[in-house]
Amino acid sequence: MNAASGEQGTTETNFASNWSMPANFLFTNKAIQVCGVFELTTSATAPTLTVRFKFGTTNMAVTPASIPGNSYATRTMVECATFQGTAAPGASVAVEAGFGPFGAAGTANSNYMNTVGQPVTGINTTAAITVQISAQWGTATAGNTIQLHQFYVMELN
């Protein structure tokens, strides 16, 4: 199931959907955007939520821990991260990452700063890379869930 429940505690949970970026796909100025469309349900006092976009196990773009909103019942949230190559494919390449809007439907969206220093170095772009999204609640509270309904990747150039 593509869900990360607050009842699971504070363990980071990878969503089941991911994309295998082909070897040598990312190179100088090549950009992709990875998006997740989520459904949120929160309790009356929602805990913080952190969303991570990863290349394998490497954090590329991580939201600040923030409270998405209290007492949500099946609200939609869209989170997108853009990744850009900075060099020819190699065993240890720097890749830039940044965010688009983050927020639940019906609330004010804000452009979040990526909490990961940029560029992220040491990425092996000569091998296939699993691009995935994970979520983590700040406290274990029943009634808080995030489900990934759509996962998509766009080649921007």
Image: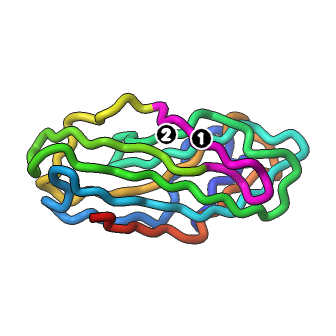
Give the magenta range: 102-115
Residues at badges 1 and 2 in contact (C-beta under 8 Å)?
yes
Q: Nearer the viewer, residue 118 or 124?
A: 118
Q: Going by the image, does 119 lie left or right of 34?
A: left
Q: Measuring 68% from the left and 36% from the top, which residue is drawn there?
A: 66
Residue 125 position within the rendered picture, expressed as x and y whole percent measured from the top left: 17, 51
Q: Measuring 71% from the left and 63% from the top, which residue is drawn there?
A: 76
Q: Going by the image, does 76 lie left or right of 33?
A: right
- Spatial CA span between label 1 and label 2: 7 Å
| Residue at the spot of label 2 | 62
- Describe the colour scheme in one phrase: rainbow
For label 2, the crowd category at 10 Å Cα-Cα, with few meaning under 14, some 14 to 19 and many 20 or more, is many
Of helix, strand and loop, which one carries label 2? Answer: strand
| Residue at the spot of label 1 | 50
- The answer to which quarter of the image holds residue 91 is top left
Task: Work out whether 83 lies above or below 45.
Answer: below
